[in-house]
Image (cartoon, helix red, strand yellow):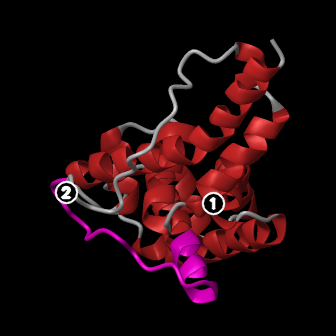
Amino acid sequence: MNEETLVERARDGDEGALTEIVQTHHKRIYHVALRMCGNVQDAEETLQDTFISAFKALPSFEGRAKLSTWLYRIASNTCLMRKRKYASDPDILSVDEPWIDPDSTDTPRYFVDWTYEPEDLLLDDELQHVMDEAIQDLSSTLRIVFIWRDLEGLSTAETATVLGISQSAVKVRLHRARLKLRESLSEYFAEAQALNTDGT
């Protein structure tokens, strides 16, 4: 069935329509929630809260955005609210900050060039763990942009719509997130390079 029919049936309490919405979108929302929350229990609760909130709000869904975009926005808000409720994680950027201050302490200064590391190192489980920890160390406002834009593959425009911010804000936050992640991974690669040098 098309999306409009699916939404109408879901509004009427059709269990088949509600189930189809969940089955279509739950994996992606769960992946984002897991990246945001950092643990399975919180991710599962966030997933459940997202669909509960969405189904309660279905009567107000006007269809001006795609159903997926609307659901992802609810999921993002649910993730951010959970992070702010259970942790001290203040936003470091205003909603539409249009520029990057070169003197800001948020801009990393130290990098190791790891662009051309061997493929087997880039796919190493240990590196994946380091990467996951680095993502968790990002502020929520940077992390959610990085997850939707780089990990989930949404476009800049789609990410902006999902998060309710401007495209310029998405670009600024994504740039800062990438810089911070690169800085976090620099130490790992510096140690790997030192080990490789010592071993030769």
Label 1 crowd (10 A; few <14 / some 14-19 / many >=20): some
Please name the residue shown 50% across and 26% down the image: 113
Relative image position of residue 46 (x, y in whole percent): 68, 71
Label 2 crowd (10 A; few <14 / some 14-19 / many >=20): few
Q: Which residue is mark 2?
A: 101
Secondary structure beneath label 2: loop
Q: Quadrant of residue 123?
A: top right
User: Magenta part of the protein: which range?
Assistant: 78-101
The three-letter amino acid code for the residue at tag 2 is: Asp
Residue 39 visible (yes or no): yes
Residue 24 visible (yes or no): no
**Side of 133 where 103 appears, left or right:** left
**Side of 55 where 158 appears, left or right:** left
Relative image position of residue 50 (x, y in whole percent): 62, 70
Which quarter of the figure is the N terminus placed in? top right
Please name the residue shown 69% across and 49% down the image: 132
Secondary structure that dominates the magenta span: loop
Secondary structure beneath label 1: helix
Decide: marks 1, 2 in contact (CB < 8 A)? Answer: no
Q: Which residue is mark 1?
A: 136
